[in-house]
């Protein structure tokens, strides 16, 4: 059986406009651009919706929450990629489980076992297991 999965972590932050993310790498698949493979910057700031699969993240991704003067360290084990997501205003307004301005105070850094298709997913033979673990620490 081939497996693909993500651990969805909705991180609370002071202000999306005062946030930076590092450690995610620069190569990503942009889900908003028909899964186009893209190159980005080493430091991420947001001005719009984001839905990306970073294909070669470092062992630690750091959310710099400058509004609350803290850093959130996200370390993933058993993952081969990381999803970074924020629905921005239009997405938040269309979601039933988020306040219209909820995008301003949240960001997702998801530990992900990603593949381009189910056929490329993680194979588990009978008796095998695989752990996907996310460690989050405030600094």
Image (cartoon, rainbow, N blue to C red):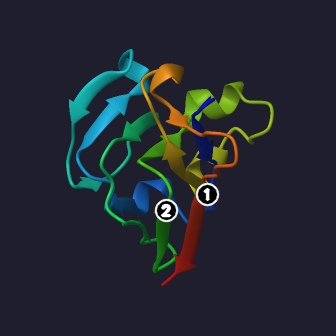
Q: Quadrant of the N terminus?
A: top right
Secondary structure under the numbered disc 2 in the rendered image = strand
Left or right position of 74 against 45: right
Query: Does any portion of residue 48 appear in the rendered image?
Result: no
Residue on which the image places disc 1: 131
Q: Relative to 120, is 63 above or below?
A: below
- Residue at image coords 57%, 50%: 104
Residue 72, position as x, y percentages in the image:
49, 72
Q: Are marks 1 and 2 in contact (CB under 8 Å)?
A: no
- Residue at image coords 68%, 30%: 93
Query: Does any portion of residue 54 appear in the rendered image?
Result: yes
Left or right position of 128 against 122: right
- Residue at image coords 49%, 21%: 119
Q: Relative to 81, is 71 above or below?
A: below
Q: Residue furthest top?
A: 34
Residue 73, position as x, y percentages in the image:
47, 73
């Amino acid at each position: 059986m081939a497996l693909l999965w993500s651990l969805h972590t909705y991180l609370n932050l002071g202000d999306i406009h005062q946030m930076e993310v590092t450690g995610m790498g620069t190569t990503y698949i942009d889900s908003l651009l028909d899964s186009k493979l893209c190159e980005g910057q080493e430091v991420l700031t947001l001005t719009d919706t984001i839905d990306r699969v970073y294909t070669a993240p470092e062992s630690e991704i750091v959310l710099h929450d400058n509004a609350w003067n803290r850093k959130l360290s996200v370390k993933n084990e058993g993952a081969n990629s990381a999803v970074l997501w924020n629905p921005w205003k239009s997405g938040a307004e269309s979601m039933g489980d988020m306040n219209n301005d909820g995008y301003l105070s949240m960001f997702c850094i998801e530990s992900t076992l990603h593949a381009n298709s189910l056929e490329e997913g993680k194979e588990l033979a009978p008796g095998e297991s695989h752990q996907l673990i996310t460690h989050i620490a405030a600094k």
